[in-house]
Image (cartoon, rainbow, N blue to C red):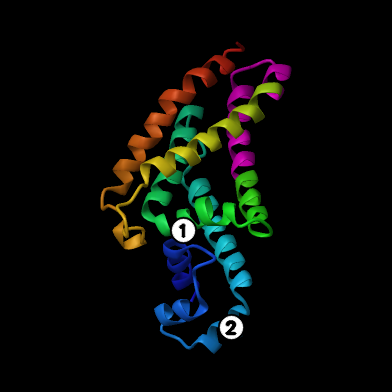
């Protein structure tokens, strides 16, 4: 039922989506959807929480923990872009639908973003410490860089994952999504790592 809800919300938007349509797509009765998921608002919240957790897990799992700092960042970005490319309905719900519907949905997305920013802050901060970057410089710059990088990644995912009209479902994700994700990650790394490299040497 939650899988059907993801597809329905992504294709039709929160307001136009109906519990009847979700039940039909899931192959169950409408009363069963209400029995387990109670209301459209609660169902949408459950969808956001599940999809946000899956995205964060994909990013953290993609990072190579003992690799150099630039490799860790690149692998995390690749994990992010690979997941959003392979699950465009999930990304549409998180990035387009949830953000525009107000509370409590926007809060759920903000929590996901804060978790990603915190994770990236840790990666950049560790790299700065390993490079003997001045502590006061790192403290001032690292959090801002993490916010900027996460925002840029979200924008690039939106750009990279444009689908033809009516082709937003997960089944339409390209077979070479990993290769495409690596190209997109490389685009962002080419943009971001120059500035980060300067931070690493204390500039």
Q: Position of residue 47 (x, y in %)?
A: 55, 65
Give the residue drawn at x 43%, y 44%. Answer: 158
Can you say whether 143 is above or below 118 in the image?
above
Give the residue drawn at x 50%, y 58%. Answer: 93
Magenta segment boundaries in residue numbering: 116-139
Q: Is residue 159 left or right of residue 35?
A: left
Figure quadrant of the C terminus: top right
Q: Position of residue 185 (x, y in %)?
A: 40, 35
Q: Secondary structure at mark 2?
A: helix
Q: Is residue 118 magenta?
A: yes
Q: Is residue 7 left or right of residue 166?
A: right
Residue that sits furthest to the left in the current view: 175
* Residue 64 visible: no
Kindly report which numbered mark, 2 or 1, lies closer to the viewer in this rendering: 2
Can you say whether 111 is above or below 181 in the image?
below
Mark 2 to mark 1 CA distance (whole Å):
22 Å
Q: Is residue 49 magenta?
A: no
Among numbered discs 2 and 1, the one appearing first in the sequence:
2
Q: Which residue is mark 2?
A: 34
Residue that sits furthest to the top in the current view: 203
Give the residue drawn at x 31%, y 58%. Answer: 167
Q: Which residue is mark 1?
A: 90
């Amino acid at each position: 039922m939650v899988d059907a809800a993801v597809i329905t919300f992504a294709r039709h938007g929160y307001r136009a989506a109906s519990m009847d349509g979700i039940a039909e797509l899931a192959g169950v009765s409408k009363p069963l959807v209400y029995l387990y998921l109670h209301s459209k608002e609660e169902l949408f919240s459950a969808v956001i929480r599940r999809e946000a957790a899956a995205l964060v897990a994909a990013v953290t799992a993609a990072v190579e923990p003992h690799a150099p700092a630039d490799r860790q960042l690149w692998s995390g970005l690749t994990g992010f872009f690979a997941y959003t490319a392979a699950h465009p309905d999930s990304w549409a719900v998180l990035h387009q639908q949830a953000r525009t519907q107000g509370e409590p949905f926007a809060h759920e997305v903000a929590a996901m973003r804060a978790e990603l920013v915190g994770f990236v802050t840790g990666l950049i901060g560790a790299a700065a410490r390993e490079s003997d970057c001045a502590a006061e410089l790192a403290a001032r710059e690292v959090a801002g860089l993490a916010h900027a990088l996460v925002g840029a990644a979200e924008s690039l995912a939106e750009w990279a994952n444009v689908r033809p009209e009516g082709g937003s479902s997960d089944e339409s994700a390209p077979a070479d999504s990993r290769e495409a994700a690596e190209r997109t990650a490389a685009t962002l790394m080419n943009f971001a790592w120059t500035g980060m490299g300067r931070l690493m040497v204390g500039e």
